[in-house]
Image (cartoon, rainbow, N blue to C red):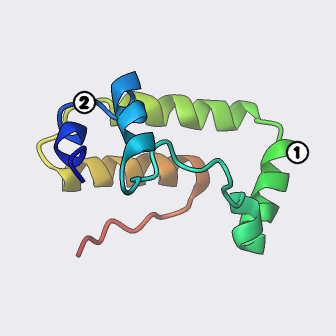
Amino acid sequence: MENLGKFCKDAPSSAQFQKLQSQADFVINRPPSPAVVPLALMHEVFGKFMQDLQRHEPTYEDNRFLSELRRKMVEVYKDENERNEEFNKVCNEHSGALVSTNRR
């Protein structure tokens, strides 16, 4: 446990930190284990999304929508509600889909 105080002094990515971690009485899982379950296996909807994403060919209209959305979202707004209203407006103009701006 005498190494515990040294952890706070070194960045987690430093060689010294990694050396101390291997000598410590406990480890804090840095770096994280590479054994991660892919998102597509968590729920079938994510798997379907990944399949759709691989097959989708962006259209001119898709590109126009994203270009306008990017241009509008980098502007400065007086508050988040005004930003939400602009986001909703752009989505509505391009798809007819009304996006809820209700915030709790």
Asked whether 16 or 70 is in front, the reply is 16
- Secondary structure, mark 1, is helix
Tell me where residue 72 appears, x and y as whole percent: 36, 33
Q: Find disc 2 in the rendering and name its residue.
A: 10
Q: Which label was assigned to residue 74?
A: none
Where residue 102 sits, quadrant-wise, is bottom left
Measured from the top left, where is residue 1 in percent x and y?
A: 24, 54
What distance separates the C-alpha of mark 1 from that of mark 2? 46 Å
In the image, is residue 18 above or below residue 37?
A: above
User: What label does residue 55 carry, if any?
Assistant: 1
For the C terminus, the image quarter is bottom left
Where, by quadrant of the figure, is residue 39 drawn?
Answer: bottom right
Q: Position of residue 93 (x, y in %)?
A: 51, 48
Q: Nearer the viewer, residue 55 or 65?
A: 55
Q: Which residue is pictured at 22% across the width and 48% down the height?
A: 4
Name the residue located 53 percent from the left edge and 28 percent from the top edge.
67
Packing grade of label 1 (10 A; few <14, some 14-19, many >=20) is few
Q: Residues within 10 Å of mark 2 (few under 14, many from 20)?
A: some
Mark 1 and mark 2 residues within 8 Å of each other at the beta carbon: no
Q: Please name the amino acid that badge 2 sits on.
A: Asp
31, above or below 14, in the image:
below
Secondary structure, mark 2, is: loop
Residue drawn 55% across the image and 62% down it: 97
Q: Residue furthest left?
A: 78
Question: In the image, is residue 26 above or below residue 4?
Answer: below
**Residue 99 appears left or right of 60:** left
Relative to residue 37, is residue 56 drawn left or right? right
Note whether 53 is above or below 20 in the view shown: below
Can you tell which of label 1 and label 2 is closer to the viewer?
2
* Number of numbered tags placed on the structure image: 2
Residue 32 at what x, y percent from top left? 52, 48
The residue sitting at 72% across, 73% down in the picture is 43
